[in-house]
Image (cartoon, helix red, strand yellow):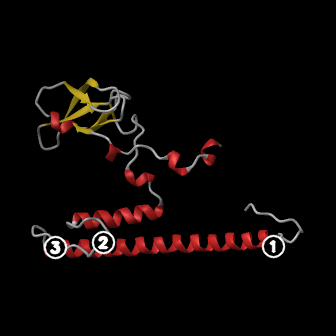
Amino acid sequence: MIWATTPRLALKRHTVEQCDRVEARAWAEAGRTTATLSTRRGRGGMQTVELEWTPSHFGGERPWFLCPGCGRRVGVLYDAGDGFFCRQCGNLAYQMENETRTGRKILKAKRLRVRLGGTGSLLEEFPGKPPDMSERTYERLRARSERADQAACSALHEKLDASRARMERWGEKLVVARNGGGNGTAQTRL
């Protein structure tokens, strides 16, 4: 298994948050059947993408892009380097998919703080209520944020405890190695 020996960082895919995106609704001129998109990444240039229209439940129509890679109907195309493609054809992940369990908890706590008008730093004071937000919504988001902060801190404590335990085991192995390892030969490698 090749993937088992590959470092975790090498397995991370580009994310949709890193790519330019185009939504089909931006091309909602009635009767339009194609959209010409300009790529900024990769080879650069123009790309023509077909549009398909479907009826809406309450009247009117909704535009969809037909992905140049797979032909599926999608609402958003991403500039993944070689042109505009859907998320699957561009092999793009969401940011959360590349995060560890601890990283996801920290990211959730940061996003809630930003939504409330803060900087996202867990070390800064909690942001006050934005003027255009109702008190009920603010309190609900504040409670959710406090739970997320607590989960992030707990996950970090677990990680630190595990690291501390590993370091203590390595320290014990190093002491044993420096004292001869019990078999009369000095071993300095761990």
- Report the disc number at residue 145: 2
* Cα distance between the residues tagged 2 and 3: 13 Å
**Residue 140 spot, x, y in % from top left:** 24, 74
Q: Amino acid at mark 1?
A: Asn
User: Within the image, what quadrant is residue 72 found in?
Assistant: top left
Nearest to the observer: residue 123 or residue 159? 123
**Residue 93 spot, x, y in % from top left:** 40, 46
The residue beneath circle 1 is: 179
User: Within the image, what quadrant is residue 184 found in?
Assistant: bottom right
Classed neighbour count for the residue bearing mark 2: other residues with Cα under 10 Å, few (<14), some (14–19), many (≥20): many
Q: Which label's residue is closer to the chain start, 1 or 2?
A: 2
Q: Amino acid at mark 3?
A: Lys
Nearest to the observer: residue 41 or residue 92? 41
* Cα distance between the residues tagged 3 and 1: 61 Å
Looking at the image, residue 51 sits to the left or right of residue 10; the answer is left
Element at badge 3?
A: loop
Q: Residue furthest right?
A: 184
Q: Nearer the viewer, mark 3 or mark 1?
A: 1
Looking at the image, residue 137 sits to the left or right of residue 155; the answer is left
Q: Which label's residue is closer to the chain start, 2 or 3?
A: 3
Residue 18 versus residue 175 in the image, above or below: above
Element at badge 1?
A: loop
Q: Amino acid at mark 2?
A: Ser
The residue beneath circle 3 is: 129
